[in-house]
Image: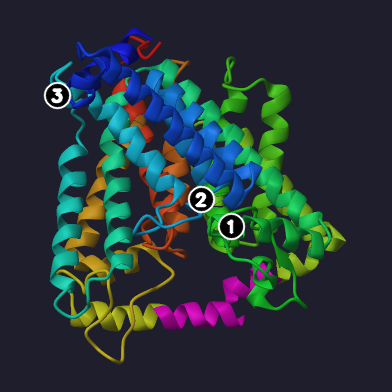
Amino acid sequence: MDSWLITTHDFIAATPLHWILHSRHRWLTTAFTFLLIVAGGSGCSWLLAEFGIIPLAALVLVVGYALLALRNIEVAYGGVIGLVTLLPFGSLPFSIGFTPTFLDLALGGLFLIWLAPLILGQRKLELVATPLDGPVAAFALLAIGAFVAGLAHSPLGSYLLRHFAEVLLSIGFFFLVTNTVTGIERLKRLTRVFLLLAGGAALLGIILYVMPDSLAMQALSALGRVGYPVGGGVLRYIRDDPALMQRATATSVDPNVLGSLLNLALAIALPQLFTSHPVLKRGLLIPLIALLGLCLGLTVSRGSMVGAVAAIGMLGAMRYRKLFLLLLLALALILLLPWTRGYSAHFVEGLQGEDLSTKMRFGEYKDAFILIGRHPLLGVGFGGTPDIDTYLGVASIYLLIAEQMGLLGLASFLLIVGILLYRFGNRWYRKILPPPALEPFWYGYHGALVGGLVGGVFDHYFFSLDFHHSVTIFWLILALATVTTQLFTASETPTGNE
């Protein structure tokens, strides 16, 4: 509380408000307070008349959240995590020259809370160094270089500029996380929040899936006021054919996007089953894992499911052998239950490359290799291609990075994940293992990263301009995986961020 008051006082002292609030003319302070009340009341009246009681109540909640976030940065973290899981595409219902998303505002606020004491001179800039800092910074600089070079053949519009800035903000999120999550207690709390909110997204996805179509369509279309699509297109089906199986989306719009979130959350949650002090009580943890797994299946996201299998396989091979039994049980249920036969047939068609969507994906890969072959060094940037016979976009994070940033950008990205996984694997091989309190987080976050990287072979969401929240989730998980290795030595358990 004291630090928040000091920060607020220093902020006022650095602005003209200091002169007004500390003026020897009492009438000036009184007039300012009166004008502030009138302006606030007028604004609330206008919002009530223009948008109704719900947006006004939402504004009050946002103001309350902002005040709490100023007191505790974990509240700001909770807002960001809540948005990437439950309202990823939400945006302001009005324009301020552009229409920022709620995630833009929450991330910007989180950075402001982190940097405000530095700006106001309360403390010096003391960054926590990690072996990934240089590679991540180099990756961001290469992205900027590719973006600037790409402007030679693609116009700079507000859409492109804003979404590229969002990607840079998400990459910068890595540094914020590694500098503010410096103890196991904060890591535990953030993990708990992430799992609960991801479980909430899974529950919402299941509820909307079993609802009558008309009711689900009405519920999802209600989000149109905050930037979501409306109408029949909000319900998704295999190959977008209503005659085929429906796919769960929750509020993620795209079932593959929801699948990528659940893939990561499942890998983080499973190691908690095997620790004596999980972040959630087992009576809540086990149903939550069941929700994550069930909703992942209902997304029919084959790439995310392959990623989840890879993550669970890694966790089982390196530490938790009982997870192989869980995999076998899930596979048996999918193969034997009569109402999952169409589901398993769809998956087999994908593996054999027989269905239309898989053939289209193979076509994208072929076209991507052509584009990369023509522009191998720095790619074509983020706005478009200079050739009329090629296009920008492919369902693979690796090929997409190579298209946009060239082989240099792809090599930089692979260096980042390579260093992270080498540090993890080398410690495991040499049996330099974390203490019991940190163990499930160490395995869980690295397992989630493996699941995301394997799923990224088939999906591009973790580096797509159109899916800012997915990019944010990826860099959050990568940063927390880095933190788990930073946190432990062979002889002591860290207890910072109490």
As drawn, which residue projects farthest toward the bottom? 389
In the image, residue 350 lies in the stretch drawn in magenta: yes
Question: The residue under label 3 is which amino acid type?
Answer: Leu
Question: Taking the image as drawn, is residue 434 in sight?
Answer: no
Can you tell which mark lies on residue 182?
none
From the image, give the main secondary structure of the stretch colored magenta.
helix
Residue visible at 65% across and 62% down?
300
Residue visible at 23% across and 21% down?
20
Can you tell which mark lies on residue 125?
3
Q: Position of residue 278 (x, y in %)?
A: 58, 20
Question: The residue under label 2 is which amino acid type?
Answer: Pro
Check the picture and name the quadrant holding the C terminus: top left
Q: Is label 1 in contact with label 3 (beta carbons under 8 Å)?
A: no
Label 2 sits on residue: 88
* Mark 3 crowdedness (10 Å alpha carbons): few <14, some 14-19, many ≥20: few
Question: The residue under label 1 is which amino acid type?
Answer: Arg
Secondary-structure class at tag 1: helix
Q: CA distance from mark 2 to mark 1?
A: 14 Å
On screen, residue 313 versus residue 69, left or right, reads: right
Q: Position of residue 208 (x, y in %)?
A: 74, 54
Secondary-structure class at tag 2: loop
* Mark 2 crowdedness (10 Å alpha carbons): few <14, some 14-19, many ≥20: many
Q: In this rendering, which labeled residue sits more in front, label 2 or label 1? A: 1
Where does the magenta region start and end?
346-364
Q: Position of residue 323 (x, y in %)?
A: 62, 37
Question: Taking the image as drawn, is residue 283 in sight?
Answer: yes
Label 1 sits on residue: 225
Count the marks: how many? 3
Check the picture and name the quadrant holding the N terminus: top left
Q: Quadrant of residue 239?
A: bottom right
